[in-house]
Image (cartoon, rainbow, N blue to C red):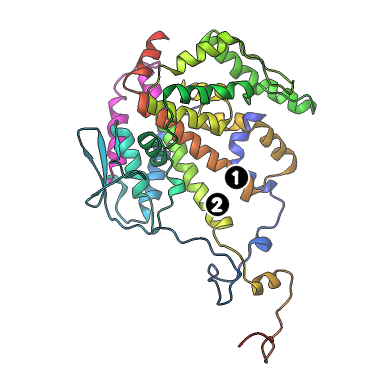
Amino acid sequence: MWRSCLRLRGGGRHLLNCPRGGLTASEGPGPKPPAHARAYAPPAERKRFYQNVSITQGEAGFEINLDHRKLRTPQAKLFTVPSEALAVAVATEWDSQQDTIKTYTMHLTTLCNTSLDNPTQRDKDQLIWAAAKFLDTDAVCCRVEEPETLVELQRSEWDPVIGWAEKRYGVKIGSSTSIMGPSIPARTREVLVSHLASYNTWALQGIEFVVSQLKSMVLTLGLIDLHLTVEQAVLLSRLEEAFQIQKWGNVEWAHDYELQDLRARTAAGALFVHLCSESSAVKHKLLQG
Amino acid sequence: MAALGSPLRTWRGLLRELRYLNAATGRPYRHTAAYRYLVKAFRAHRVTSEKLCRAQHELHFHAATYLCLLRSIREHVALHQEFHGKGERSVEESAGLVGLKLPQQSGGKGWEP
């Protein structure tokens, strides 16, 4: 039943029960603030000031050029990425901006900027610790006790993922209905921390980002080990919300809005991790089987 | 549990997303760096006929992730434009929602010039 949830995306409009015309009607173009204005207009965004986006290779890596100017990070460092695929994706992001630059859609650029600038000044161990902290309150491990249908749904959807993770890493994770969350044995934590340590700092930024979006370490591991697709991971992370939507109806301007945003961020994070670690770490994992 | 679908479907989806991205600029999507890179990557991994080729599965997975990224960004922006991008309604519009009209006072209100 829940596999069909993925196909509900467009067809779920019939669940929407509020009339679309009435609530969002507006008389003309977006309101300009009148003279004694109390109306709020959204802040003006930066206009697209470049025509062409191109990629060049420098000594430190690949750089992005907007017309003839080199792209820089918010802290004015030169924007260089280690992998060509990542540079192409970032260039596509900049190229896809029309009229105004919407920085909230440019997730890969944001991740690269964070990795280059490191504004919170975290080193590798702190990133690993921040990601592993989510294990204690992992979304797929915290279960409800009622209603019965939700309990059953959580069991049938989340147990296979936990089972996969336990088998893949040879650890015990388990699940719990207690308010304290699951009790993760110390050995599990050690194994997972040492697994994370095998990724480089850039990939760890991506992993920590995905973990904080999905609120689950197990789902992130499934994503970066190519066991779950992005849509599946997001669905599993939002399982209870999807359950309530199925029961009470979908509110497009809230539910779909958040769903697409979560999907975009998770996909960007997952892609970032793959592109930053494809040269060395991932190949090792493949050989270990 | 990896319900990836067929590579052809992912490829078509990627082309469609690239087409949408480049529709506004007017430049054909075949000239973009993203298109050239994807063509090269897909061609390079098509040669092996082995079904369980790991590199092929990996490439398909990354392509599907990128497709999800492009698609969800586009839909998110569309939802934002439709529902959240218009700012606040003016007083006249708000009154009009419940069927009221603001009175036309020829002398203006007391404090207006």
Quadrant of residue A160 in the image?
A: top right
Q: Position of residue A273 (x, y in %)?
A: 41, 28
Q: Position of residue A127 (x, y in %)?
A: 47, 26
Q: Which residue is mark 2?
A: B79
Q: Position of residue B104 (x, y in %)?
A: 69, 86
Q: Is residue A147 magenta?
A: no
Q: Does residue A143 appear left or right of residue A165 in this picture?
A: right
Q: Residues within 10 Å of mark 1 (few under 14, many from 20)?
A: some
Q: Nearer the viewer, residue A76 or B97?
A: A76
Q: Which residue is mark 1?
A: A256
3D distance between C-alphas at marks 2 and 1 = 8 Å
Task: Point out the stretch of residues depicted in magenta.
Answer: B32-61
Given the current orientation, which residue lies at the most extreme bottom position? B107
Q: Does residue B1 appear left or right of residue A156 in this picture?
A: left
Residue A57 shows up from this direction? yes
Which residue is at 66% across, 88% downward? B108
Q: Does residue A265 appear left or right of residue A78 in this picture?
A: right
Q: Chain of mark 2?
A: B
